[in-house]
Amino acid sequence: MRRRLKAGAILAVLLSLALFVAACGPEKLVQWSPDGKRVAVMSNGTLFVADEQGSLSRPIAEGVTRMSWLPDSTQALVVSERKVKSWDEMVKLAPVGFKEKEIITAAHAATEDLLGYPGEIDDFKPSNAAALTGEQWGAAILYIKSQGDLRLKQKLGEKEWKDLEELEVEVRSLRVISMVAGTAGDGRALLMTLSEIGEPRISPDGAAAAIVTKHTRGWFGSAHEVLSVISLSPGSTPVQVADHVSQYPDWTRDGSTIVFIRSESEQDGDSKGDSIGVVAKRAVRDKAGAITAEFPPAINLAKVLFGDTLKVRCLRDGRILFSAHEISLPAADKGFPGRITLFEIQPGTTVIVKRLLSGAVEQGLPDRVDLFELSPDEKRVAVPGSKGRVSVISLEKGEIDAVVDKDGQNDILSIPVWRNNDQLCITVPPGSPLGSARRAEIVLWGLGQPVSISQHWPDSAITWLK
């Protein structure tokens, strides 16, 4: 006897494909402008701005997932998500990665495979699984439901088909918007894509950005990140720099070169520290600041054990600060690869890689050194912990200040960010001695007593602080 497919399981598969997003880690939901006079807050997609005294604006933009201030402190590059429910709307938007004819062909073939599949849906895989990326398969679901196939309706049942009709796909956009209260608008669109976009990294002159996008191989395939650069001038398109990269690249201080960490493996899914990688740099802009037509080959600077959250920051004096595992082989399998710590690459004819912290300092740090934040004067580094701890390291003295010295019940609410050389902005959970008893708060730490800047904000502005 042939077993009928479970409609609920079918919907679970379709939902997973149509609503595919990368696994989200800690984000910077609070960011200070470069001049330290205003702070941007992202609360469940709504973007607000507050001044130094904590006076909060009306919403600046909606659907915002990530943002980075431009150097002028009046504009920002924002990543927004838009829910697309219909095939016709997807065709009209035509984001990067949307190949209409290929998606339609693949959708028809997958529908026939699904209708004839007798087994458990968890094991279902269309014969043309590799025909589309994971993001394109999400768009294919919109086409499948737009056809109103009576055979599929019958197989799913009335309730499950109705649920299918409610499915939505995320389309991401990259826009330059004004951050001045009272001038809210859609801003200037640079890019629309099916792929998830990470936090943009703005060039020092504010004329270009490095972006990392998530790409998925086939039907429920593995994923990897791709690094591209894009001019912030109208009509620009992104140009790929490297693939299989970590999420946090940086520009050299002259804005000509991107420094990044990438895996040397050709296979996707090597993001958990199980492949060899390199810290590399690649020139991408000419002397006039234009993105070049052809990039020279990347130059490898150091070998590392790859991880997708490893971070690079370029210093004014030419040094490169980066997070990585310190490993030595052979090593016992238990506990490998161990903790992440900080290293620096020193400029010169011969590349010198140096461990930045002593063992004693490293042992006293919270456990997310990979998410370190460098102060504007490059003298201190803030390090968060997975249970809410925060510490600050003096790079000159090698000393630690414990900002939040105890593990809590919450994960990282928002990656700590510097307001200026002296003040660090952190988020604390309800009941913290730095905040309030009733709810989580945003706190400035550094000069004098810690100050909560969010204490008079409505709950709607900080609903994400849970």
Image (cartoon, rainbow, N blue to C red):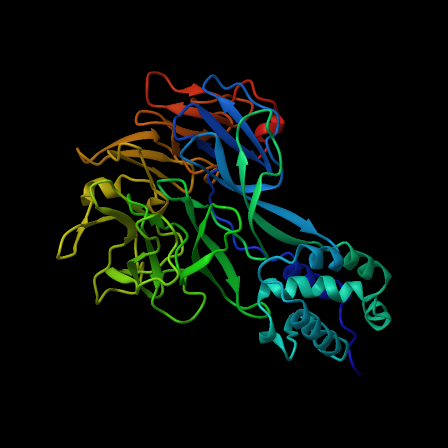
Along the line of sight, the residue nearer the viewer: 317 or 337: 317
Q: Which residue is drawn at 26% across and 64% down?
A: 332
Left or right: residue 244 versus residue 14 is: left
Vertical side of 244 occupied by 355: above or below: above
Position of residue 135 measured from the top left corner of the image (x, y, whole percent):
59, 62
Figure check: 418 above or below 14? above
- Residue pushed farthest bottom? 1
Q: In which quarter of the image is residue 71?
A: top left
Q: Is residue 3 above or below residue 158?
A: below
Q: How many labels does the image show?
A: 0
Q: Which of 11 and 198 is in front in this view?
A: 198
Residue 152: image quadrant is bottom right
**Left or right of 123, for residue 408:** left
Q: Which residue is drawn at 31% across and 63% down?
A: 296
Residue 362 as seen in the image, left or right of residue 26: left
Judge whether residue 139 can be spotted in this image: yes
Left or right relative to 109: residue 159:
right
Q: Look at the image and tell me in which quarter the C terminus lies.
A: top right
Q: Residue at x 65, y 47 (%)?
A: 82
Does residue 113 sit above or below 210 in this rendering? below
Q: Is residue 432 something one can see in this rendering?
A: no
Q: Which residue lies furthest to the front in this view?
A: 288
Residue 14 locus on image (x, y percent): 69, 63
x, y percentage for residue 176?
52, 40
In what quadrant of the picture does the N terminus appear? bottom right
